[in-house]
């Protein structure tokens, strides 16, 4: 599927939601409990990886997230204590390219089983320098030059936000399940069963999203962070990202005019911001363009401010927000 997507350039990178591991029943919030627990110990890089580990591992795993609630995942600094945890754990589950410091720490560690989610599905490029296009041939998700802050892409300009597409997330889940089976064969049957259950739920979510977004009045939605490329491509939508704007700063009059024109031409009703990131930029654009604001959660973590207690609940909340914005509610 080749869906149009325009990337609105700006002067500085929008801060990404500082969200992390929250209500995973089998997960340990105590960072000291990463190894030697009597279970299959897994260190996960951030919430989407920890959620997979908990769902697939069930009672057989002890999951510890390197990214704690409230931490910004992309620029996470690994502590000496966490480095030591990696030497004690049975497996490390991460998404290479999203958290450079995590990549380095896991790469240098002696952990026996290293599971890179980026190798378990096909990564694509999203966005374009000229601001038009959405495809996987020649469009890279790139931040504008001169910014400070983290990158939103893996090596080669690939978009890492695969978990926001339930089909791709299911592919990752399949790979994680197989890795768990190999690393802990005594519980392989349970891992297989749990993986099948999770994949089934993700397929049901895909069906729900596809059905829920039909008969919409517009395909276009505006976000402050270009994280919904895979989601947009999956469901035939167009993401307009106010990329590069610090959440505390205001966009220029020229940029607001450009967004206003885009909104008018494409029937955009809403500017979306993230759960814990300041909504100042979204409000500035929305007020000048006569639009509404709402939350569209990139699910980099779960906190008390999230609209749901886990991946599935938040994705359902995202669907409701998009249905209202796109006129399909």
Image (cartoon, rainbow, N blue to C red):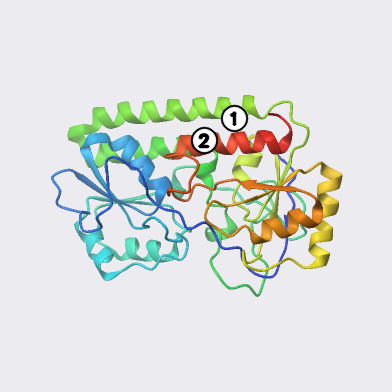
- 202, above or below 297, in the image: above
Q: Position of residue 230 (x, y in %)?
A: 60, 43
Q: Residue at x 36, y 46 (%)?
A: 50
Q: Residue at x 62, y 28 (%)?
A: 210
- All told, the count of numbered labels is 2
Task: Please say if the residues under marks 1 and 2 sit with CB atoms less than 8 Å apart.
Answer: yes
Question: Which SS class for mark 1?
Answer: helix
Q: Residue at x 83, y 58 (%)?
A: 258
Residue wearing tag 2? 166
Callout 2 crowding tier (Cα within 10 Å): few <14, some 14–19, many ≥20: many
Q: Position of residue 98 (x, y in %)?
A: 48, 58
Callout 1 crowding tier (Cα within 10 Å): few <14, some 14–19, many ≥20: many
- Residues under labels 1 and 2: Cα distance? 9 Å
Tell me if I can see residue 242 in this picture: no
Q: Position of residue 80 (x, y in %)?
A: 27, 70
**Picture quarter containing residue 86?**
bottom left
Tell me if I can see residue 158 in this picture: yes
- 8, above or below 228, in the image: below
Residue wearing tag 1? 209
Which one is closest to the eye, mark 1 or mark 2? 1
Q: Report the side of 73 relative to 39 (left or right).
A: right
Name the image quarter holding the N terminus.
Answer: top right
Query: In the depicted view, which residue is nearer to us: 156 or 48?
Result: 48
Q: Position of residue 72 (x, y in %)?
A: 46, 61
**Picture quarter containing residue 310?**
top left
């Amino acid at each position: 599927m080749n869906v149009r997507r325009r990337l609105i350039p700006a002067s500085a990178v929008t801060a990404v939601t500082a969200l992390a591991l929250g209500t995973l029943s089998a997960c340990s919030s105590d960072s000291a409990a990463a190894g030697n627990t009597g279970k299959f110990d897994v260190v996960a890089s951030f919430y989407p990886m920890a959620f997979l580990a908990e769902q697939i591992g069930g009672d057989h795993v002890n999951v510890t997230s390197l990214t704690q609630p409230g931490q910004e995942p992309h620029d996470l600094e690994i502590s000496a204590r966490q480095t030591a945890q990696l030497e004690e754990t049975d497996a490390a589950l991460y998404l290479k390219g999203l958290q450079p410091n995590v990549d380095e720490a896991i790469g240098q560690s002696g952990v026996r089983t290293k599971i890179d989610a980026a190798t378990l599905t096909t990564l694509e490029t999203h966005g374009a320098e000229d601001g038009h296009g959405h495809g996987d041939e020649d469009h890279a998700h790139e931040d504008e030059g001169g910014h400070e802050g983290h990158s939103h892409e893996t090596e080669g300009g690939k978009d890492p936000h695969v978990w926001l597409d339930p089909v791709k997330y299911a592919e990752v889940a399949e790979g994680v399940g197989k890795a768990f089976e190999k690393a802990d064969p005594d519980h392989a049957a349970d891992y297989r069963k749990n993986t099948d259950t999770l994949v089934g739920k993700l397929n049901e979510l895909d069906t729900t999203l596809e059905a829920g977004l039909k008969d919409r009045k517009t395909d276009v939605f505006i976000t402050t962070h270009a994280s919904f490329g895979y989601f947009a491509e999956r469901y035939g939508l167009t993401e307009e990202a106010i990329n590069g704007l610090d959440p505390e700063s205001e966009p220029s009059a020229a940029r607001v005019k450009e967004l206003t024109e885009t909104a008018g031409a494409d029937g955009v009703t809403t500017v979306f911001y993230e759960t814990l990131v300041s909504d100042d930029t979204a409000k500035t654009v929305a007020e000048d363009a006569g639009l509404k604001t709402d939350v569209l959660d990139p699910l980099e973590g779960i906190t008390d401010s999230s609209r749901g207690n886990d991946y599935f609940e938040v994705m359902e909340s995202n669907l409701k927000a998009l249905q209202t914005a796109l006129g399909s509610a």
